[in-house]
Image (cartoon, grey):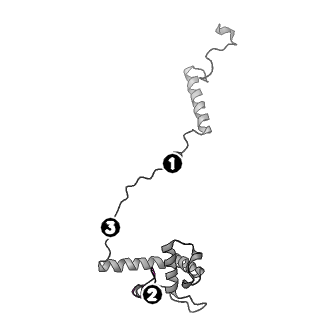
């Protein structure tokens, strides 16, 4: 009897030929079906890998097989095969959905700082002083317009 969430005989017959074979040299892999059922259990429950039940074999085997097949593209091949086969039979109804939800960020994450950098402020002041000199104004507009120590100004 097949447990809840485990591969049925029909599903196993469909994916078994697509899985990588055992290598001729070196250690032989554990049963693919038992390991895949352990991977499915972990993905369905969201539990840590260490909590995979012992009936699926060592958790390290499930994890390593999952990662190895993820890296070599085995899972992608299984998905592509399932989609194309089911689509050819007409079992898949493709629906396109656009989510119109608005995700707002915190106000402090809205962008760059509003303060001008120190170098930019210094350059702006230098340009302002040059323009004021050309117009005959004091180089520092914040300075008093009359020099108190100049007797000619009296």
Which quadrant of the view contains residue 98? bottom left
- What residue occupies the far bottom of the structure in this picture? 24
Which residue position is annotated with label 3?
A: 95
Which residue position is annotated with label 1?
A: 106
**Earlier along the polypeptide chain: callout 1 or callout 3?**
3
Write down the region rendered in magenta: 1-12
Which residue position is annotated with label 2?
A: 16
Instruction: Using a 10 Å C-alpha cutoff, classify the residue at mark 3 as few (fewer than 14 neighbours), some (14 to 19) or many (20 or more).
Output: few
* Residue at the (55%, 88%) spot, across then down: 30
Secondary element under disc 3, as helix, strand or loop, is: loop
Instruction: Using a 10 Å C-alpha cutoff, classify the residue at mark 1 as few (fewer than 14 neighbours), some (14 to 19) or many (20 or more).
Output: few
Residue 8 colored in magenta in the image: yes
Q: CA distance from mark 1 to mark 3?
A: 33 Å
Q: Are marks 3 and 2 in contact (CB under 8 Å)?
A: no
* Residue at the (69%, 9%) spot, across then down: 151
Q: If the image is split into quadrants, where does the C terminus sit? A: top right
Depth order, front residue of 40/133:
40
* Residue at the (64%, 9%) spot, across then down: 153
- What residue occupies the far right of the structure in this picture? 149
Q: CA distance from mark 3 to mark 2?
A: 29 Å
Is 13 placed above or below 87 here? below
Instruction: Using a 10 Å C-alpha cutoff, classify the residue at mark 2 as few (fewer than 14 neighbours), some (14 to 19) or many (20 or more).
Output: few
Q: CA distance from mark 2 to mark 1?
A: 49 Å
Residue 5 colored in magenta in the image: yes
Which quadrant of the view contains residue 5? bottom left
Depth order, front residue of 146/18:
18
């Amino acid at each position: 009897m097949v447990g809840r969430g485990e591969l049925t005989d029909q599903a196993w017959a469909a994916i078994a030929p697509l899985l990588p074979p055992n290598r001729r040299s070196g250690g032989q892999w554990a049963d693919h079906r038992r390991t895949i059922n352990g991977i499915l259990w972990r993905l369905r429950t969201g539990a840590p890998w260490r909590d995979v039940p012992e009936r699926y074999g060592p958790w390290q085997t499930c994890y390593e097989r999952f990662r190895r097949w993820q890296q070599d593209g085995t899972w992608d091949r299984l998905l592509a095969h399932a989609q194309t086969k089911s689509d050819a039979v007409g079992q898949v109804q493709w629906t396109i959905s656009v989510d119109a939800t608005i995700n707002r960020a915190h106000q402090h994450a809205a962008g760059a700082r509003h303060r001008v950098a120190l170098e930019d402020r210094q350059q702006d002041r230098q340009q302002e002083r040059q323009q004021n000199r050309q117009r005959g104004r004091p180089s520092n507009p914040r300075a008093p317009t009359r020099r108190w120590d100049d007797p000619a100004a009296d």
